[in-house]
C-alpha cells in the first residue's frame, strides 16, 4: 500500500525530529487575542524543515485547559462545551471543575508568516468506533477534524470531516515505529495528508488528504 510504504520510509526520520519540529507548548492566550499571539508564535518559530516528511501527530489532554493546550481548546471550544453539556444532561456532574473527558491529536506546520494546525477531537459524543486491536492495545475511532490557518492577524477555521483517532493503552514511551498516527504536508498541492499504522501495518480507511483553502488575496 502506497501510504504504508511512505510511512515506513520516513519513520526513522520522524522519531529523530519529532521533538524539535512539532511544538509541544504554546503560549497562554485569551480567545480574543489568539490570532495576534499565533502570528507572534509563527514568526518566533523556525520554519518547519522538510514539511513533506511524515511525522507522528502530537496529543493533548484538554480536560483541564492550560497554557500548553490553549490553542486547541479555542479551536474546539463549541464541541468541548457540547460534550460537557451531554454529560450534564445525563446526570454526570463529576466534571464541574473541568471539562468532561476530551483529548485531541494535532499536526502543526510553521512558515515565516503562517501556521497551520490540523487537529482531531476525541470525545464520547463526537466519535464512533472503527476498530479494536487488542494485540496492539490499540483502539481506532472516527472523530471530527478541523484545520486552523493563522495568516497574519487573521485565522480561518475549516471543518475537515472525520478522521481516524488512535488510542493506545499502557504506560511508558510508545514506539512510533510500531503504532502511530502520522501527518505530512504536500507543498505543491497544499494538502495535509494523514496516515496510521498499528502493529507495523497501515490501517485501512485511515489515509486521508485534506486540501487547504486558497490563500486570500483581498
Image: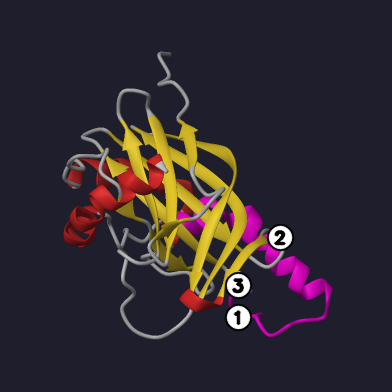
The answer to whether residue 15 is left or right of residue 38 is: left
Residue at x 30% of width, y 64% of height: 177
Query: Taking the image as drawn, is residue 35 in sight?
Result: no
Is 124 placed above or below 217 here? below
Query: Taking the image as drawn, is residue 217 in sight?
Result: yes
> Where is mark 3, residue-wise?
99
Residue at x 32% of width, y 58% of height: 26
The kind of secondary structure element at disc 2 is: helix
- The answer for how far apart the CA atoms under marks 3 and 2 are is 10 Å
On the image, the x and y values in percent for residue 132 come to 60, 70
| Residue 1 - label | none
- Occupied quadrant, residue 198: bottom left
Few, some or many residues within 10 Å of mark 1 (<14, 14–19, 20+):
few
- The answer for how far apart the CA atoms under marks 2 and 1 are is 16 Å
Hey, which residue is sitting farthest front in the picture? Answer: 1
Give the number of the mark in front: 2 or 1.
Answer: 2
First of labels 3, 2 by sequence position? 2
> Where is mark 2, residue-wise?
82
> Where is mark 1, residue-wise?
97
Few, some or many residues within 10 Å of mark 2 (<14, 14–19, 20+):
some
Q: Is residue 73 magenta?
A: yes
Is 174 placed above or below 209 here? below
The kind of secondary structure element at disc 3 is: loop
- Which residues lie in the magenta part? 72-99
* Marks 3 and 2 in Cβ contact (< 8 Å): no
Hey, which residue is sitting farthest right in the picture? Answer: 90
Residue at x 51% of width, y 59% of height: 73
Amino acid at each position: 500500500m502506497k501510504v504504508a510504504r511512505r510511512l515506513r520510509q520516513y519513520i526513522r526520520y520522524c522519531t529523530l525530529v519529532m521533538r524539535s519540529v512539532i511544538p509541544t507548548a504554546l503560549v497562554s492566550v485569551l480567545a480574543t487575542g489568539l490570532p495576534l499571539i499565533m502570528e507572534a508564535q509563527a514568526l518566533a518559530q523556525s520554519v518547519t524543515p522538510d514539511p513533506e516528511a511524515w511525522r507522528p501527530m502530537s496529543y493533548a489532554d484538554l480536560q483541564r485547559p492550560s497554557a500548553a493546550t490553549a490553542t486547541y481548546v479555542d479551536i474546539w471550544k463549541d464541541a468541548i462545551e457540547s460534550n460537557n453539556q451531554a454529560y450534564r444532561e445525563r446526570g454526570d456532574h463529576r466534571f464541574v471543575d473541568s471539562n468532561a473527558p476530551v483529548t485531541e491529536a494535532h499536526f502543526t506546520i510553521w512558515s515565516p508568516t503562517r501556521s497551520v494546525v490540523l487537529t482531531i477531537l476525541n470525545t464520547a459524543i463526537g466519535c464512533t468506533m472503527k476498530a479494536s486491536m487488542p494485540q496492539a492495545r490499540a483502539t481506532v475511532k472516527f472523530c471530527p477534524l478541523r484545520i486552523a490557518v493563522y495568516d497574519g492577524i487573521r485565522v480561518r477555521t475549516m471543518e475537515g470531516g472525520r478522521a481516524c483517532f488512535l488510542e493506545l493503552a499502557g504506560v511508558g514511551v510508545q514506539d512510533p515505529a510500531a503504532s502511530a498516527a502520522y501527518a505530512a504536508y504536500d507543498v505543491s498541492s497544499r494538502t495535509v495528508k494523514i496516515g496510521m499504522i498499528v502493529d507495523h501495518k497501515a490501517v485501512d480507511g485511515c489515509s486521508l488528504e485534506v486540501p487547504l483553502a486558497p490563500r486570500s488575496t483581498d
